Amino acid sequence: MIVNYEQIVAFWQQLEQTLDQLLDSQNDTYFDADLLLDHYRDILHKIDRNLTFHFEREEGEGPVEMVFGCDGYPESIHSVLSLISAAPALRGIEFRAFNDRCDPVPSCVNLGDEECRIEDYWCSLRLIEGRLQLAVYMDALPEVLEMDARVEAVMIFLDAIIGEFEIMTRIWSLDWFEIPADPLDFGLIPLEELRNAFDKIKDSVKPLGITLH
């Protein structure tokens, strides 16, 4: 994908010019500035329609982090890296590419009225012909994955367990299945044990979706 660097410069100029307005609306990691945030998204989507951002902050004082990603699309990794490489140094905010692993991994994710516990999900990770294939198993698998909040919760868990960048560049496929009556009989492991399994074999596969020039 060819990146338009003029649009990248325009995004950072707009953020710098409106930074005080953004920070003044801050409440923990929530910003009461929907119009401004929508404007940021509009500019980012002119660079690459897959670009996303959200905010994080460690407990206690310190600058908020604006975390950029690409919604799981490996073809947009270069756009994220190009955006971050041009980021200015600004007071009160820091910029980062992709969701990092979390320690500890959250045991529960709340999405609206849905409480999703990591212990409810199982998985399998298989190395087949040099490619890592990940499968997630859950109760009452929905016909339309995007309509189920639990799917979004699992993706949050996966980011925390493996890291967003590693998911895009190491996992060849991600499939979803109904959980069997006895997961152990099918060779499955609890989702919370995925990191150990992944780290043991991740170096056996060639990174996907990114080419260094």
Image: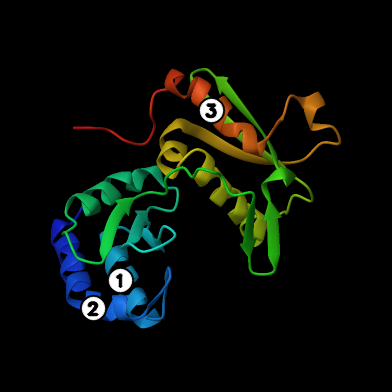
**Which residue is nearer to you in this view: 106 or 86?**
106
Q: Residue at left 56%, top 27%?
A: 196
Which quadrant of the view contains residue 32? Answer: bottom left
The image's colouring method is rainbow
Type of amino acid under label 2 = Asp
Label 3 crowding class (10 Å Cα cut-off): few <14, some 14-19, many 20+? some
Label pair 1/2, CB-CB below 8 angstroms:
no
Query: Between disc 1 and disc 3, whose residue precedes?
Result: 1
Q: Which residue is mark 2?
A: 20
User: Toward which corner of the image does residue 42 lie, by quadrant?
Assistant: bottom left
Local secondary structure at mark 2: helix
State how far apart marks 1 and 3 are (Cα). Answer: 35 Å
For the residue labelled by badge 1, is the local secondary structure a helix, a strand or a loop? helix
Whether residue 144 appears in this view of the structure is: no
Residue 149, percent from left and from top: 65, 60
Instruction: Determine the residue positioned at 16% across, 59% down.
Output: 88
Mark 1 = which residue? 40
* Amino acid of disc 3: Phe
Q: Residues within 10 Å of mark 1 (few under 14, many from 20)?
A: some
Q: Of the residues tagged 2 and 3, which is closer to the observer? A: 2
The vertical placement of 197 against 168, above or below, is: above
Q: Earlier in the sequence, mark 2 or mark 3?
A: 2
Q: Nearer the viewer, residue 88 or 50?
A: 88
Q: How many marks?
A: 3
* Label 3 sits on residue: 198
Q: Is residue 114 left or right of residue 65?
A: right
Q: Residues within 10 Å of mark 2 (few under 14, many from 20)?
A: few
Residue at 63% over, 62% down: 110
The answer to whether one can see residue 202 in this image is yes
Question: Disc 1 vs disc 3: Cβ atoms closer than 8 Å?
Answer: no
Which one is in front in this view, the residue at disc 1 or the one at disc 2? 2
Residue reaching furthest right?
A: 181
